[in-house]
Image (tube, grey):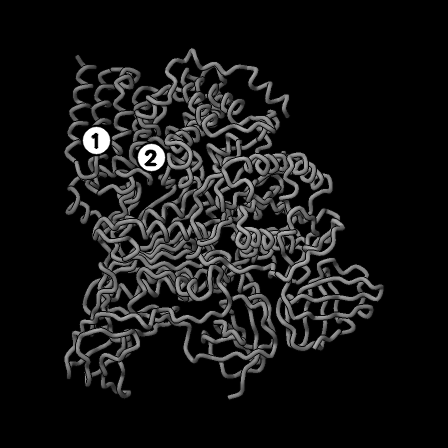
Amino acid sequence: MILRYSGLTEIKGSLIAVQGVQHVVYDEVVEIYLDNGAVRRGRVIQIEGDKAVIQVFEGTRFISLSNTQVRFTGEPMKIALSPEILGRVFSGAGVPIDGLGEIASDKYMDVNGLPINPVSRIYPQNYICTGISSIDALITLIRGQKLPIFSGSGLKHSELAVQIAKQSKLSGDEESNFAIIFAAMGVKNDVASYFTKEFRNSGVLERVVMFLNLSNDPVIERILTPRVALTAAEYLAFELGYHALVIMTDMTSYAEALREFSSSKGEIPGRKGYPGYLYSDFSSIYERAGMIKGKKGSVTQIPILTMPGDDITHPIPDLTGYITEGQIVISRKLEKEDIYPAIDILPSLSRLMKDGIGEEFTREDHAVLADQLFASYAKVQDIRSLASVIGEDDLSENDKLYLKFGSYFERYFINQGINESRSIEQTLDLGWKLLSILPISDLSRVKSEMIDKYYIKDKESLNFEPGNFLENENQI
Amino acid sequence: MKDEVIYGINGPVVTVKDSKSFSMSEMVYIGPDSLIGEVIKIDSEITTIQSYEETSGLSPGDKIVGSGTAMSLLLGPGIIGNIFDGVQRPLKSIEKSAGSFIPKGCSVSPLDDSKVWDMDITVKMGQNLSEGQIYAVCMETQSIEHRFMVPIGVNGKVIEVKPSGKYQINDVIAKLETKNGVFDLSLCQKWPIRIPRKVAKRLPIDIPLVTGQRVIDSIFPIAKGGAAVLPGGFGAGKTMTQHQFAKWCDADIIVYVGCGERGNEMTQVLEEFSNLIDPKTGKPMSERTIFIANTSNMPVAAREASIYTGITLAEYYRDMGYDVAMMADSTSRWAEALREISGRLEEMPAEEGFPSYLVSRLSEFYERAGRCSTLSGSTGSVTIIGAVSPQGADFSEPVTQNTKRFTRCFWALDKNLAYARHYPAVNWNMSYSEYFSDLDPWYAKNVGPDFTKLRKQIVKILREEERLMEIVKLVGEDVLPDDQKLSIEIAKLVRFGFLQQNAFHREDTFVPLIKQQEMMRVIIYLHEKVKNLISASVSMAKVMELGLFSDLAKMKYEIPNDNIEKFNDYISKIDNQIKKLIS
């Protein structure tokens, strides 16, 4: 029994209300027919007796109380999936927009997904070598992890995401099973084309699925985009056995779309006007990463978000950080000093790192080296702030060594070329070389056997060739 | 009675119009899939129900059936080692029946009703039993004995009893003649999650919960039956610290509630605990642990219930006479679930959008901690360690502030310490424990008479450092006089050598109290000796050359937990080295 209801009772923001309807199902998809022939889609978000409130993905422009007919489909939002989705481009709502026609398949999946049973998960332990020293050594990315990039507007987070996507595919022997799902929410056209261009140049485009909701596309559609993209990722990972890397940018635009929707619905706002359920909503996205017992593939997420005003305590990065397994923080200060990638390692963290590194996975010294680098670099910050008060000249000799360590660490370790891929051995050796600037007695995290094996006692051999730095610069 | 049907749906909130048949807090079954829900508001026109499951797919006109009882748990053998969601659905059985994803409306009995238990029935015909008394026991796991208690509110004479032997949880093993007729005693009973279980008497709390973590046991101890709050922004190591407590604390039973936690982390706990061996019993750690896993993407109302499910299970085992420790990670997610539901009900918000009843809910919850004599005459305790995730790591937010009021231990996790990879990142200047004085006699009797004195000296060193750091921040360390330099160096030793503890190091992950005491003693010994040197005008630079400070910083790794005598080597080393300077 498919009925079309004519006429609406209310239009507000992106919401429309229909009265006198029967057997409406919560969360079902609705088709909205305009007199001019246009068809839009929406979703039932509230039911009260015979009144249904519908969220229109494409917005309510040109909809009037009388020019519209509504058809309830009785189905939740689903997308068609088949192996053919690889290499295709879709809208933010999952409709093909590359002119290659519909996806022919009888496999439809609900975009909302279902929570993975914690008992069925596999604890992720396989590390992904990204070739980027700061990430591999200090914020190790693990297959099945969700590791967001916290950035600010104008910083080079897209470049970093592309570099991770390009280089990490090279590691390991399962190269052929790698897929990249790219979800753009409210990003500028040129950012989207930058991603397309880079994927094409590195020859991976046929393994990329793109879902594009650009900044001039309908705002409410953005709420669907990550869900549609993750449904595709889950299909590729858990049905076809791909290792799916999902890049979602920009989560801030997503949250803003949610806020817009929430306020038009008249909900009581929480912090900074974002709805009170922002945490639950975020987790329904981020928690769709992981690995499942008995399935070959995995879903790894790299969401990118721009922190409004570079404020890490803003609700969006704050709530994200509570759900994701760590974060990579990009610093404007480092970027100004021409460091790429400008990763501020101190607030950055990978929660899954501790079990994915060490003798079995990378090298026996990895954990202590990372610990010591963090501790020493944290001390550099203290000494820098002291130096800004009393001047560098009055620092003790030991403190001056720390300043040297700090700036070398930033210039030679964090900084690297945009196409430069370092092996994990190169990265770890470089770390020891830098630690060797400091006296042994200051390396309290490291056991003496490690010192004997890796610490370079001959300070003369510690030449950091100046060309190294410039070379990298040329590559950028 | 007429069928009640759905009128409206808004997220997890479902309404029924013109119904008189539901009572407050009643558990109901919603729609064709029989989703679990709870009645949370009734007015003359609309009855409001919160659904513990995803409501998509429901439709107005779908039936709602009342259960006649409040939201309750099924209590009986088979709880330990099991993994439940927030409303006691067994996740392992769900995996078996539904696969890797959790579908809607899967009704599985919380406890395996086909499993056979080897029962030892202890009551005799004609015996008078009162509420809470034990009528049978069985070994639930290799290390935990399950004691079957007469349900609260039931008193009577045994008129029928089965012989000891093998029974399933729904078998009747004894009958009582009560004032209200015959009562069947089986292997299970029900208890509503929001009501504290009855005890005979509350006892003073004067025994510490030993965690093996130095900064806790020595500096900010918690008592068995106490409540502690563990606030920290993301990345400060809350979860890691909770895991350490769950692994090493000396409670008999651990209830670990992952409330709105990450799925992968929950899996890690599950995997790790089934591989870990309990040092006390030599059995797998999961044989003394109950898991409640309501990850952040599972329905929000069940997240709200998960805390109560956890504490009710804890109380049930306390009543058997066990010391139970409950870890709740994180209560902020619980408070946010309250806020989210309150928002859907369009209630007037109080502070930061949280409902005004947040405070009373928190105090009710933390008051369920305690040490008691139970109705069966034994002693048991429930200790609560609640993690709080303050928004933006701001400790002035309502959940942290109000939790602080109802707990006596405050372990503030510090982001800056975590950035410097100082774990556990408990900030010694912001944290406190009010249990000191209650526990001192115990420490004096069971560890050593001067434990308290040593601890006070360590705390004093840290206070002194805090004061000096204000100056150092302005002028640098070099200009300080030698005695103050010593204070800074010794405080550094306390921080690196004592407070900082490596959870991944075999010896360091758990440290017995006696070793903690000896470590403090050696540090204080060094402090005293060097102080004398400095007053005899030996320069601090000379002292530092001896390398004693960096040697002592490594004693946590070098001295095995079971070889306390080795501390004497350090004492004599200090003596020898210092002699060199004097001569």
Outermost residue toward the right in this view: A36
Q: Position of residue A380 (x, y in %)?
A: 46, 25
Q: Is residue B472 above or below residue A52?
A: above
Q: Secondary structure at mark 2?
A: helix
Q: Is residue A416 above or below residue B276?
A: above
Mark 2 surroundings within 10 Å by alpha-carbon count, few (fewer than 14), some (14 through 19), many (20 or more)? some
For the question of whether residue B497 can be seen, the reply is: yes
Which residue is label 1 attached to?
B522
Q: Position of residue B283 (x, y in %)?
A: 24, 53
Query: Closer to the observer: label 2 or label 1?
Result: 1
Q: Amino acid at mark 1?
A: Val
State the separation of the CA atoms marked 2 and 1. 19 Å
**From the image, which quarter does the N terminus of chain A lie in?**
bottom right
Which residue is label 2 attached to?
B463
Q: Secondary structure at mark 1?
A: helix
Q: Which chain does the numbered disc 2 sit on?
A: B
Which quadrant would residue A80 be assigned to in this image?
bottom right
Q: Amino acid at mark 2?
A: Arg
Q: Position of residue A156 (x, y in %)?
A: 63, 34
Q: Nearer the viewer, residue A36 or A235?
A: A235
Q: Position of residue B148 (x, y in %)?
A: 24, 71
Q: Earlier in the sequence, mark 2 or mark 1?
A: 2
Horizontal relation, residue A348 to residue A213: left or right: left
Q: Which chain does the numbered disc 1 sit on?
A: B
